[in-house]
């Protein structure tokens, strides 16, 4: 909705701006045309004045028009005559035959304001009479305008009101047009938002955006087909991995059972018992690998069912530490617990979260064969408000440039380097368990050396 309002606001603003610019452009253009017309040649008033100045009278009473005046008349195809006080023509030049030679006061009043026999005429008063200059027919238009003085005084206010009315009208028209456009765009925007969420879209195909609507519908159909195909492929892959894991567990259980029995046989030599022990340990490692692979596959394709409930993180941390100590943790790996907030609860699958934390501790043990100190910390992140389950050690650590790479599944296009130790499923599995709980796994290098793994989870209030 905010996007539609923003589009409408910009459309209205652009329309008003364009309207104002066009109005100013028209005013400037009109003014330039009028200015050009006025200054393109001498005005009729200036011409009649020049002709009047070129007309001279001799001592014998004869009138002579100088060559300059003749050139002006010829240039404008005009004619001229001089009326005396009684209204008679006492001199003329290029006078048409249809022009009378005597005039009354009323006739002079009429043609001095308008036309004489449809000739636009202009007059100039001389001491010896009235000079009349006539232009060819249909060359000039003469109009008389009369305005009240009060109306002229209020003209600036009227112009401002006119501009305001024009702006209001432009605003109204732009709102009407913009509303119609928005009504047509709204389904397209809703469809695009639905596409971004992976939902199926069917936009009505009509109006000016018909082609775009069809393209959105076609894209939605294509994406749905691809999503269905990917979902079917992922489900088949996950089911295949699950089936393989199940098929491997049965013979693997038999191998582990017989290997354990061989270890306990009293009549076997020490070397044979060691070989049986190796078979058992490698079998357990293979069983762990199969279990991790199956779990990662289920998490990757969002097929792992989650048994969600409220979990108190300090209790979970104490259980992890207790289990490691009770299972005979080597003295080279002293483990400690630091709880800064006893009231941190998260909503999650206890079995998966236990597995994630256990994997982080096992990761520290596996990659530091010479020993390291391991610390588990529970605290609340102040800025984000998330609960943080931190597992850190002072061992060899991981190069900073490899921190992001180790969270990618091994032997995929996104991973730059293959895992150097183990099968490489541990940290990617922990990362996906965190994502399944709407959290994330952050890996950091300790300033004193070693690795710091931060499991961030949303807190239950």
Image (tube, rainbow, N blue to C red):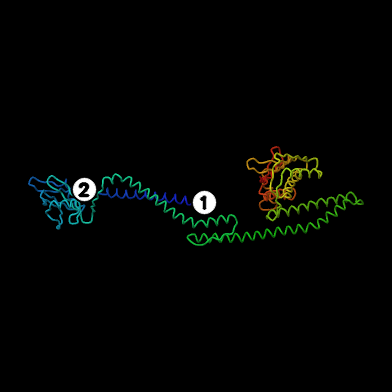
- Which residue is drawn at the image coordinates 23% and 48% (left, top)? 43
Which quarter of the figure is the C terminus placed in?
top right
Q: On the image, numbered disc 1 is attached to which residue?
A: 3
Quadrant in which residue 392 is drawn: top right
The answer to whether 98 appears left or right of 366 in the picture is: left
Where's residue 307, x and y in %?
71, 52
- Ranked by sequence position, the earlier of labels 2 and 1 is 1
* Residue nearest the observer in this picture, 272 or 300: 300
Between the C-alphas of marks 2 and 1, the distance is: 63 Å
- Which residue is drawn at the image coordinates 27% and 45% (left, top)? 150
Circle number at residue 111 = none
* Residue nearest the observer in this picture, 412 or 297: 297
Where's residue 194, x and y in %?
57, 56
Circle number at residue 45 = 2
Where's residue 453, x and y in %?
70, 43
Q: Residue furthest top?
A: 448
* Residue nearest the observer in this picture, 55 or 363: 363
Q: How many marks?
A: 2
Where's residue 333, x and y in %?
78, 41
Label 2 residue SS? helix
* Residue nearest the observer in this picture, 189 or 1: 1
Quadrant in which residue 383 is drawn: top right
Evaluate if marks 2 and 1 touch, with contact meaning CB atoms under 8 Å apart: no
Q: Residue furthest left?
A: 60
């Amino acid at each position: 909705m905010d996007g539609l309002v923003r589009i409408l606001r910009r459309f209205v603003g652009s329309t008003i701006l364009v309207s104002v610019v066009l109005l100013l452009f028209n005013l400037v253009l009109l003014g330039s045309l009028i200015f050009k017309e006025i200054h393109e040649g001498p005005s009729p008033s200036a011409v009649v004045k020049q002709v009047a100045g070129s007309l001279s009278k001799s001592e014998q009473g004869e009138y002579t028009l100088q060559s300059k005046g003749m050139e002006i008349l010829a240039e404008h195809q005009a004619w001229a005559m001089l009326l005396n006080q009684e209204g008679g023509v006492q001199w003329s030049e290029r006078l048409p035959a249809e022009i009378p030679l005597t005039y009354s006061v009323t006739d002079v009043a009429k043609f001095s304001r308008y036309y004489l026999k449809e000739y636009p005429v202009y007059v100039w008063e001389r001491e010896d009479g009235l000079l009349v200059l006539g232009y060819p027919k249909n060359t000039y238009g003469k109009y008389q305008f009369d305005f009240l003085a009060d109306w002229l005084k209020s003209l600036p206010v009227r112009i401002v009101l006119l501009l305001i009315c024009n702006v209001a009208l432009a605003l109204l028209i732009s709102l009407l047009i913009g509303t119609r456009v928005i009504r047509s765009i709204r389904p397209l925007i809703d469809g695009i938002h639905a596409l971004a969420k992976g939902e199926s879209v069917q936009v009505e195909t009509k109006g000016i955006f018909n082609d775009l609507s069809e393209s959105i519908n076609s894209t939605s159909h294509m994406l749905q087909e691809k999503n269905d195909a990917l979902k079917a492929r992922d489900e088949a892959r996950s089911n295949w991995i699950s089936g393989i894991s199940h098929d491997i567990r049965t013979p693997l259980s038999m191998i582990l059972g017989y290997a354990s029995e061989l270890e306990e046989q009293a009549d076997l030599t020490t070397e044979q018992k060691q070989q049986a022990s190796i078979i058992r340990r490698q079998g357990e490692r293979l069983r762990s690998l199969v279990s991790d692979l199956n779990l990662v596959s289920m998490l990757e394709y969002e097929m792992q069912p989650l048994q969600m409930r409220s979990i108190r993180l300090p209790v979970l941390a104490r259980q992890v530490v207790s289990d490691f100590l009770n299972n005979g943790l080597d003295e080279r790996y002293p483990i400690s617990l630091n709880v800064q907030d006893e009231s941190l609860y998260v909503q999650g699958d206890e079995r998966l979260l236990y597995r994630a934390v256990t994997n982080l501790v096992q990761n520290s043990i596996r990659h530091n064969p010479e020993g390291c100190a391991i610390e588990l910390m529970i605290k609340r992140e102040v800025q984000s408000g998330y609960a943080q389950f931190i597992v850190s050690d002072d061992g060899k650590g991981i190069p900073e440039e490899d921190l992001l790479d180790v969270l990618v599944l091994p032997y995929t296009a996104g991973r730059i380097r293959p895992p150097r130790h183990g099968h490489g499923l541990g940290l990617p599995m922990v990362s996906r368990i965190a994502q399944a709980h709407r959290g994330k796994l952050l890996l950091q290098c300790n300033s004193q050396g070693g690795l710091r793994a931060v499991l961030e989870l949303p807190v239950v209030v």
